[in-house]
Amino acid sequence: MTNDSHSFRLPDSPRSAYLPLGIGLVGIILSGIGYFTDPGHFFHSYLVSFVYWVTIGLGALFFTMLHHLTNARWSVVMRRLSENVMSALPLMAVFALPLLFGLHDLYHWSHAEAVAADPILQSKAPYLNPTFFVIRMVFYFVVWFLLTWQLNKVSNQQDKGGTEDYRFKMRKVSAPGMLLFALTTTFAAFDWLMSLDPHWYSTIFGAYVYAGAFLSGLAFFVVAAAYQRRQGHLKDIITVEHYHDTGKLMFAFVIFWGYMAFSQYFLIWYANIPEETVWFLERWEGGWRGMSFVIIFGHFAIPFLALIFRATKRNVTGLTVVSLWILAMHWVDLHWVVFPNLYHHGPHFSWMDVTTMAGIGGIFLWYFWRRQVARPLVPVGDPGLERSIQFTN
C-alpha cells in the first residue's frame, strides 16, 4: 500500500457526521429545558459532562506530546487519532461558558455573604473569586488551543513532505507543552472540581484527575480505532500489535489511577485532620457508600483483572469492551466527585445526566469525526510510518 494522502482517508459519509451532531443538538435543547426545571441539578450534571469530555481531550493531548518526546515508533499509526481527539479541546471553551452562569449554583465561595461569614473562605478569597476564576479558565483554554494548533499545524506540514525537521519541531513544542499541560490540568482540576468544597484540599487531586484523563483518552482511542476497523479502515495499519501496546498503557494507568486514589485516601484518613477527612466521610455515608464500592471495584479491580492477561490486550473485541467499561467508570468517578456537593445523603440521578452528556458528547464526536474525514487517518509524511505499521511486540 502506498503512503499517499488519499490511501488513508475516510469516506465523507453525511450520516456518520450528522448523527452525532443531531444527538448533540437535541441533548443541548433538552438540557436547556432542564435548566428551567432544576437549575441546581442541571449545573452539576453539566459540570460532570463538561469535565468528562475535556479530560478525554486532555488525555489525547498528553498522548500526542508523549509520543513526540519519547520518539516512539509503535504509536505513529495512532498519532493522527490522538491529534484529532485533542483538536476538540478548543471547542470545549464554548461549552465552558454556561458554567460561568452557574457559579452561584456550583461554588459556595462565589457567594459574597458566605465569604464574609467564613474566615477560611476569606483567606482563600484572593484565589477563589469569580474574576480570577474566569481569568484562569481563559488561560487554560488558550494554552490548550496553542498547543493543539501548533502540533496540528506542523503535523499537516509533515504530510506534504516528511522530514526529520518536522519531528524535531513537534518535539520542541511538546517539551514546554508538557510543563504547561501539568500546570493547567492540575489547576483546572482544583478550580472546577476540588473547589466545589472550598474547605477541602488535596495536593494529589490534580494527579488523580490527570490519571483518569489519560486512561479515558486511551480507552477512547481503542473504541474509535475498533469502530473504524469494523468499517474496514486501517485494519492492516493499526494491528493487534498496536492494540496490545495501547492495552499495556491502559493497564499501567489503571494501576496508576488506583495508586493515586488510594494514596489520597490513605494519607488523608491516616492524618485524621477534620477539614481533610470530611470529603471522604461525606462519600462514605448514606447512599454514597455504594457508589464508592462501585468505583473501587469498577474503576480499578475489574479493569486490572481484565487487562492483566495478554490475551485481553490482543483481542480487539475484548479490549474494546474493557475500554467502554473504563469510559463508563470515568463518568461514575466524576459523578462521585461532583454530586455529593449537592446531594449529601446519596446519589440522585436525573434525565439531565443523560442529556448533558449527549449534548456535549454529540458535538465533541461530530467535531472529532469531521477532523477524521478532513485529513489522512495516519501521518503519511512521518518517516517512521512504515516501521510503525510493521511493528511487532
Image: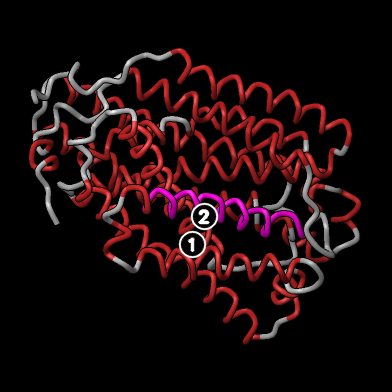
Q: Which region shows up in magenta?
A: 319-340
Asked if the stretch drawn in magenta spans residue 325, the answer is yes
Q: Nearer the viewer, residue 192 or 237?
A: 237
Magenta span: helix, strand or loop, mainly? helix
| Number of numbered discs on residues | 2
Q: CA distance from mark 1 to mark 2?
A: 7 Å
- The residue to which callout 2 is attached is 186
Whether residue 87 is visible, yes or no, is yes
Q: Quadrant of residue 60?
A: top left
- Secondary structure under tag 2 reads helix
In the picture, which quadrant includes the C terminus?
Answer: bottom left
Give the residue type that dot 1 points to: Ala
Q: Nearer the viewer, residue 108 or 236?
A: 236
The answer to whether residue 235 is left or right of residue 89 is: left
Q: Nearer the viewer, mark 1 or mark 2?
A: 1
Asked if the stretch drawn in magenta spans residue 132, the answer is no
Q: Nearer the viewer, residue 149 or 110?
A: 149
Label 2 near label 1: C-beta < 8 Å?
A: yes
The answer to whether residue 191 is left or right of residue 237 is: right
Residue at (32% x, 48% y) in the render: 316
* Circle nearer the N terminus (1, 2): 2
Compared to 29, does 221 lie above or below?
A: below
Q: Quadrant of residue 1?
A: top left
Q: Nearer the viewer, residue 321 or 271?
A: 321
The answer to whether residue 7 is left or right of residue 263 is: left
| Numbered badge on residue 207 | 1
Give the residue type that dot 2 points to: Thr
Residue 277 spot, x, y in % from top left: 71, 77
- Secondary structure under tag 1 reads helix
Residue 124 spot, x, y in % from top left: 72, 59
